[in-house]
Image (cartoon, rainbow, N blue to C red):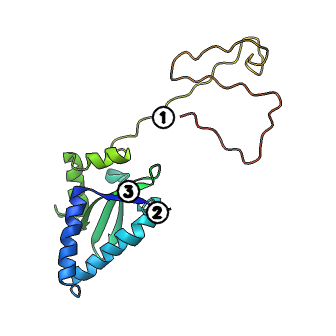
Amino acid sequence: MLIKITYSPVAAEQIASLKAKGEAKPEKPVGKLWKAVRHALVEYLPEHGLNPSHIKSEDLSGIRARHVGDRTRIVWIASPEKNAIVVLMLGEVKEGDKHDTYAVLARELRRGTFDTAFAELEVPKPGESAPPPKRVETLPPPADGAADGGLTDGAPAEPPASEDEVAPAPIPPDAKPTSGAQPLSLR
């Protein structure tokens, strides 16, 4: 299944500029770079953009990047749940330079330049944690020691103490486990 790709305004501007330069001088290095970037955007990212091997670590956790050419990087964020990615920017890696792709990305993240992209995909920005999953608690065992929680003897079950708690469903007496059963998420 192909991945839906969108572009931040920053990436769209950078891609348009590179395309114009690359098509004007197809035999020059900028033309070759444009061909490599176009190949990555059109052929590679739609099939491999969700691959976890592209995830950056440490300060840029959750950001994904792929090298194109010698020093150019395509930087994006991804949501496997939505089967979508947003290309944030293109840039050159120049370690220690203020124009290094990752230094510029960090500045733009602090400024909030890409906040709409993170909101669109519902993914946390680097340094932010994802909202914690709702905690689901089961009811304590009944005082009389019945293994089924007293649900099969006709007695009504106690309602959950709050909206965050979910009472376990009664298990029918004739239910049999099936092979390959997967755990059920109540979130």
For marks 3 and 1, give the CA distance.
Answer: 23 Å
Above or below — where is 152 with respect to 60? above
Q: Nearer the viewer, mark 2 or mark 3?
A: 2
Above or below — where is 30 with respect to 2? below
Q: Amino acid at mark 3?
A: Ile
Whether residues under marks 1 and 2 lie with C-beta atoms below 8 angstroms apart, the answer is no
Would you call the spot at circle 1 few (<14 residues within 10 Å), some (14-19), or many (20 or more)? few
- Which of the two residues, 21 or 89, is positioned nearer the viewer here? 21
In x, y percent, where is residue 42? 37, 70
Residue 85 disc label = 3
Would you call the spot at circle 3 few (<14 residues within 10 Å), some (14-19), or many (20 or more)? many
Q: Nearer the viewer, mark 3 or mark 1?
A: 3
Residue 133 disc label = 1
In x, y percent, where is residue 105? 24, 56
For residue 177, what is the image quadrant? top right
For residue 67, what is the image quadrant? bottom left
Above or below — where is 19 with respect to 96? below
Closer to the chain start, of discs 3 and 1, is 3
Count the marks.
Answer: 3
For residue 185, what is the image quadrant? top right
Closer to the chain start, of discs 1 and 2, is 2
For marks 2 and 3, give the CA distance.
Answer: 11 Å
Residue extending furthest toward the right:
174
Q: Which residue is mark 2?
A: 2
Closer to the chain start, of discs 2 and 3, is 2
- Which of the two residues, 159 or 69, is positioned nearer the viewer here? 159
In x, y percent, where is residue 48? 45, 65
- Which of the two residues, 176 or 130, is positioned nearer the viewer here? 176
Q: Is residue 97 left or right of residue 121?
A: left
